[in-house]
Image (cartoon, rainbow, N blue to C red):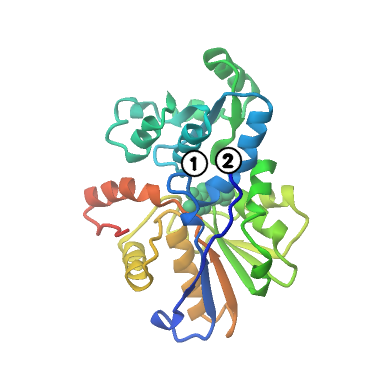
Amino acid sequence: MLKDILHIENQTIPLQLFSNSNCSLVIKREDTLHPDISGNKYRKLKYNLIEAKLLNKNTLLTFGGAFSNHIAAVAAAGKEFGFKTIGVIRGEELIDKIDGNPTLSFAKSCGMQFHFISREAYRNKTNKIFIETLKNTFGDFHLVPEGGTNSLAVKGCEEILTDKDVAFDYICSAVGTGGTLAGLVTSSKLHQTVLGFSALKGTFQSSEVDKYTTKTNYKIIDDYCFGGYAKIDAQLVRFINDFKEKTGIPLDPVYTGKMLFGIFDLINKGVLKDNSRILAIHTGGLQGITGMNQLLKKKNLPQIIY
Ligand SMILES: *Cc1c(COP(=O)(O)O)cnc(C)c1O
């Protein structure tokens, strides 16, 4: 059912358009992997869907917020690979706002059924008793955790790097839960440094990475999270738009935009040494831009072009 991914393009960025460093920068276009199951979310779901089929489960249940790339990806994967999908969504107030929310209305169009719960109840998302009550309500399902991270997800993310990528000194990725980074670290070579750019305050995801690998050739930084998860300002929007104009590559504001902003800053400060060969993973997430542009409009900030 899930086809093996044959070829993901590595695209070279003409770095002289942005900096006078002589590093080289290449973007792995995981965002082009599937039109609706974005980048790393496809990697993370692959072995989970194979497992669900093996266990004869016909329903997937997962958790997420109103703009979640993971919710959109699970809904699209369910439609494509023949699963019913249930999204447990943080925020009861969203129940009558589905049509105005691009992520939720997309998920709905894929057939996802929603269960809206309060922020307080949402904190129980890993609690066994809470999961049992969900089973009583919805029947049996295959549970995919929030953000999709588990050992099968990490196994899928190990397939992002290929043999050709051994030539790079740095491998960069945005970090949410840390599952994608764990896969990259696992399949990296010890002469490579894997740099994780946290999309939220803190670098606590290293404890998640360490659950899946004993390798330590990685570092997580939160210097480029712009104040926190999904926080964004005019400087970041301008950066994303400038990058799109010069390279043709669209970036999302929650993950990949912040990562690339950080990579350029580290290059310009000389933290990434001269002649470094840098590979940045474009993990996708572009579905979130429409929702973010609605928020930017309300705040009178510039729109993201994509
Ligand atoms: C979910 C997501 C991430 C974070 O992945 P984790 O495995 O949770 O760290 C990074 N980039 C994009 C575009 C995402 O949607």
Nearest the viewer among 227 and 70 is 70
Residue position for label 1? 70
Q: Residue at x 40, y 34 (%)?
A: 107
Q: Residue at x 68, y 29 (%)?
A: 54
Determine whether, in the image, residue 43 is placed left or right of residue 235: right
Nearest the viewer among 33 and 17 is 33
Secondary element type, mark 2:
helix
Question: Which image quadrant for residue 301?
Answer: bottom left
Q: Residue at x 74, y 62 (%)?
A: 216
Give residue 100's position: percent from left, percent from top: 27, 35
Q: Is residue 139 positioned above or below 173 on the image?
A: above
Does the residue at mark 1 contact the one at mark 2 (Cβ under 8 Å)? Answer: yes
Q: Is residue 259 positioned above or below 265 on the image?
A: above
Give residue 143's position: percent from left, percent from top: 60, 29
Question: Which image quadrant for residue 203?
Answer: bottom right
Ligand 1 neighbours mark 1 (CB distance < 8 Å): yes
Q: Residue at x 47, y 54 (%)?
A: 284
Give the crowd class for mark 1: few <14, some 14-19, many >=20 residues within 10 Å: many
Residue position for label 2? 148
Q: Is residue 100 visible?
A: yes
